[in-house]
């Protein structure tokens, strides 16, 4: 079912690593020297959700939802019920008796929604025969409701009763939602911009909670939404635009347009590659900084200063799929190249990686085209507070694209991949100390010490 591998760092598969970013075997700042491989899925694993301090759930294209213990690596339950791939999963709480219990909410391509009890492995509720598959889920604890987004945006109460719904907004439907202050919901879609303010939505939500009025703002041509704080949220687009919005009046507070150099040729393949590289695949924030994954690069934006803090145009050998800011100011990223990398912000001693003219929108006219007219610049702009993004650890264990990761702090880091595996990365020194302590305790119990 699982195995321990100590200190292994040999890459699996045929992915060629960038020599410029090769860090080698000696990684003194990388504490993850042990890994535990978990097997249970038989297709791509796309989602990880933390249930509590010890448990997490994994789900993916095989339609299975597995519950794991992060300390032991044991699979506690297999949740079977969906017949097609899982498209969304989130944590939830439901009332049993008079107590609230942790639960999981899942959506699938089979057009069903399910509520699972991770304590028993049972399916508590199920909704079938939806008009379309659900692409995103959002729980609103303050209103005691939850939302499902796809071609329709539906509002449900805790008894899984439909409160209201909207018609579809575009061919692509709604793919992400975030909760904003004052009961506003920001949702994103593709192609068709619109603002939903239907009277039926307001009436239904008013019935759920007194004096509750909810507005749903739908963004066009966006691919990522991120809540930064109570007053700010961010959106990232397929064309490399990072916009910070005011959560109350929806005005733009900051704007960055990440631009690459123009391709040398005019072939369709080069144009397509350029578009992919400029797309923002993922964003994360700690309230002070935003990390954006753009193509195979990483960009750190200072929310307070409204300016870029650090960037690395090539951080992985393939597209970056997930990012995370840590409490110590470090950050992590994972990629289609199968690697998980740890980064550290360092003061910039010397000019490093060149940046093209107009690389960041804050350095030029708002929305201005920044096509380079001369040779590439030899130095980065002299901007106060600009740092370098230095590689401090490279976790090699997966043979396929790493879809995302989940941090349990000192208990470890969980990653999932297209190779059907999960890996729990652990602090080798801490694990050694815990094993030694367990041995001494056992000897004391047996009165042999």
Image: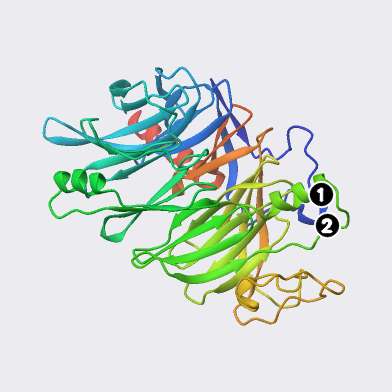
**Would you place residue 420 above or below residue 439 in this image?**
above
First in sequence, mark 2 or 1: give its number: 2
Q: Is residue 80 left or right of residue 325?
A: left
Label 2 close to label 1 by CB (< 8 Å): yes
Q: Which mark is residue 270?
A: 1
Q: In this figure, which residue is indicated by the disc labeled 2?
A: 263
Instruction: Tell me the CA gap for discs 2 and 1.
Output: 6 Å
Element carrying mark 1: helix
- Number of numbered discs present? 2
Q: Nearer the viewer, residue 266 or 407?
A: 266
Which quadrant of the rendered structure holds the C terminus?
Answer: top left
Say if residue 324 shows up in the picture.
Answer: no
Residue at x-position 43% and y-position 25%: 65
Does residue 144 appear left or right of residue 250 in this picture? left
Crowding at label 1, few (<14), some or many (≥20) Cα neighbours within 10 Å? some
Q: Nearer the viewer, residue 282 or 222?
A: 222
Classify mark 2: residues with Cα within 10 Å, few (<14), some (14-19) or many (20+). Answer: few
Q: Can see residue 356?
A: yes
Classify mark 2: helix, strand or loop.
loop
Q: Position of residue 69 (x, y in %)?
A: 41, 31
User: Which residue is nearer to you in this view: 34 or 94?
Assistant: 94
Which residue is at a point 71% across and 79% down the rendered structure image? Answer: 381
Q: Is residue 322 left or right of residue 356?
A: left
**From what the image shows, is residue 425 above or below residue 43?**
below
């Amino acid at each position: 079912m699982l195995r321990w591998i100590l200190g292994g760092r040999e890459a699996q598969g045929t992915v060629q690593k960038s020599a410029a970013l090769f860090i080698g075997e000696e990684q003194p700042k990388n504490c993850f020297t042990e890994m535990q491989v978990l097997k249970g899925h038989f297709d791509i694993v796309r989602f990880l959700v933390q249930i509590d301090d010890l448990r997490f759930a994994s789900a993916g294209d095989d339609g299975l939802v597995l519950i794991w213990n992060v300390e032991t690596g044991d699979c506690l339950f297999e949740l079977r019920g969906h017949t097609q791939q899982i498209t969304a999963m989130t944590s939830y709480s439901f009332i049993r008796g008079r107590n609230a219990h942790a639960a999981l909410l899942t959506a699938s391509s089979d057009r069903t929604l399910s509520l699972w009890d991770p304590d028993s492995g049972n399916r508590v509720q199920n909704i079938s025969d939806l008009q379309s598959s659900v692409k995103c889920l959002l729980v609103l604890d303050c209103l005691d409701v939850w939302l499902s987004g796809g071609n329709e945006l539906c509002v449900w109460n805790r008894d899984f009763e439909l409160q209201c719904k909207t018609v579809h907004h575009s061919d692509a439907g709604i793919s992400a939602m975030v909760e904003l202050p004052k009961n506003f919901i920001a949702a994103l879609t593709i192609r068709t911009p619109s603002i939903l303010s239907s009277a039926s939505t307001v009436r239904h939500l008013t019935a759920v909670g007194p004096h509750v009025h909810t507005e749903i703002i739908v963004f066009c041509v966006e691919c990522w939404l991120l809540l930064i704080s109570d007053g700010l949220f961010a959106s990232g687009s397929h064309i490399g635009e990072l916009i910070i919005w005011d959560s109350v009046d929806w005005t733009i507070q900051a704007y960055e347009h990440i631009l690459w150099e123009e391709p040398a040729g005019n072939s369709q393949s080069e144009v397509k590659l350029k578009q992919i590289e400029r797309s923002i695949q993922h964003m994360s924030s700690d309230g002070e900084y935003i990390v954006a994954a753009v193509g195979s690069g990483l960009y750190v934006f200072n929310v307070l200063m409204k300016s870029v803090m650090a960037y690395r145009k090539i951080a992985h050998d393939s597209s970056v799929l997930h990012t995370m800011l840590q409490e110590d100011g470090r950050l992590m990223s994972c990629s289609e190249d199968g690697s998980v990398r740890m980064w550290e912000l360092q003061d910039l001693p010397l000019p490093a990686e060149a940046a093209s003219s107009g690389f960041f929108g804050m350095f030029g006219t708002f929305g201005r085209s920044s096509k380079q007219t001369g040779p590439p610049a030899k130095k980065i702009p002299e901007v106060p507070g600009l740092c370098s993004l230095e590689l401090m650890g490279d976790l090699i264990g997966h043979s396929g694209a790493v879809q995302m990761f989940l941090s349990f702090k000192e208990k470890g880091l969980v990653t999932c991949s297209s190779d059907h595996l999960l890996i729990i990365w652990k602090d080798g020194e801490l694990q050694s100390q815990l094993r030694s302590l367990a041995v001494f305790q056992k000897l004391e119990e047996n009165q042999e010490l």
